[in-house]
Image (spheres, rainbow, N blue to C red):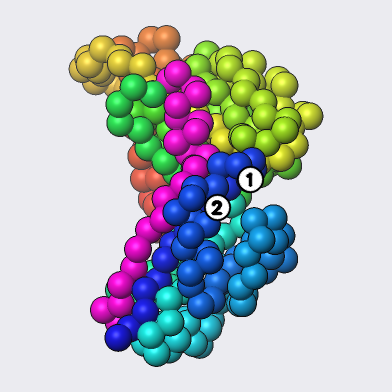
Amino acid sequence: MAGTLFLVATPIGNLSDVTLRALDTLRAVSLVAAEDTRHTRALLSHFGIKKPLVAHDAHASERDVERLLERLHAGEDLALVTDAGTPGVSDPGAKLVRAAHAASLRVVPIPGVSAVTAAVTVSGLVDGPFVFLGFPPRQGQKRRAFLERVLTSEEPVILFEAPHRAERTLAELAEREPERPAVLCRELTKLHEDVRRGTLAELAASAADLRGELTLVVAAAPERPEALEAPPDLDETIRALLRAGETPRDIVATLAASVPGAKRDLYRRVAELAREERAESSHSE
């Protein structure tokens, strides 16, 4: 009979948050696959658990996955853990889970504390659906699209960020929506837990001293009146400004006060025309 793969959530800071079921599972399995064996060995040692460990991080190869599947097929129960939180939620794990499902093996979640749900509950900004986006891309079009999605979402958005990149991310969000309410959670469940509430501009202004793990909750985009029909010459005005060398951001700032409807709709139209202009320019060369 094949074994079971248990996905065990571990504490995100305070070790007392570990569940009794997680401890029972870690004691019962034959092997623990860990994102960082040193980190997990310290956790197991704290609770008096002696168990074989094998490394299984985001860079695990197909052969690494196969080795774990072989042990499961041989009847061993395995636990997969990450350094903190739940495997597969912005942490390694999805590759092994997919492979286990494909091999018709039993996969069981052992849930526990989560930075996402902890931030949601403490923020006061979420009373229904929300969107979790994980870590922002570091650069390029993917990053711009990510930040646009944060600011235009009709539901509150939860995202993670590294402390050394948080100041830049908050500044870029605040540049577009300085008055948007947000909550920045730092070192959740740990000794120096810090929950900061304010506008994106206020949080950006105080971001230089940030340390530790960060979770940001951004309020949903406010409801805006339906866009009215734009003036017939709007596209030509935008095109003329683009050809004059104005950036899309500058064009939106120039036209926003005189164009009815949502600012984000104007931004999307400017971005669309900018792409058309680039395409036309490349074809003519």
Which region of the structure is painted magenta?
102-125
Query: Relative to 61, is 139 above or below?
Result: above
Task: Tell me if I can see residue 1 in this picture.
Answer: yes
- Which of the pair 188/182 is nearer the observer? 188
Does the segment drawn in magenta span residue 122?
yes
Quadrant for residue 59, please give it.
bottom right
Quarter of the view holding residue 51? bottom right
Place of residue 7 in the rendered image (x, y in percent of width and height, measured from the top left): 44, 62
On the image, numbered disc 1 is attached to which residue? 15
Mark 2 and mark 1 in contact (Cβ < 8 Å)? no
The residue under the point 41% across, 56% down is 110
Q: Is residue 255 left or right of residue 162?
A: left
Choose between 65 and 231: the one closer to the eye. 65
- Residue matched to label 2: 10
Q: Residues within 10 Å of mark 2 (few under 14, many from 20)?
A: many
Q: Amino acid at mark 1?
A: Leu
Residue 104, percent from left and from top: 26, 79
Q: Depth check: give the residue in front, 69 or 99.
A: 69
Q: CA distance from mark 1 to mark 2?
A: 8 Å
Q: Nearer the viewer, mark 1 or mark 2?
A: 1
User: Which residue corresponds to the image point at 39% horizontal and 28% vertical from the top-left?
Assistant: 156
Q: How many marks?
A: 2
Give the position of the N terminus as an image quadrant: bottom left
Circle nearer the N terminus (1, 2): 2
Frontmost residue, 47 versus 64: 47
* Residue 36 seen from this side: no
Identify the element where label 1 is drawn.
Answer: helix
Residue at point 45% right, 29% down? 120
Q: Position of residue 41 (x, y in %)?
A: 69, 65
State whether residue 47 is above or below residue 134.
Answer: below
Q: Which mark is residue 191?
A: none
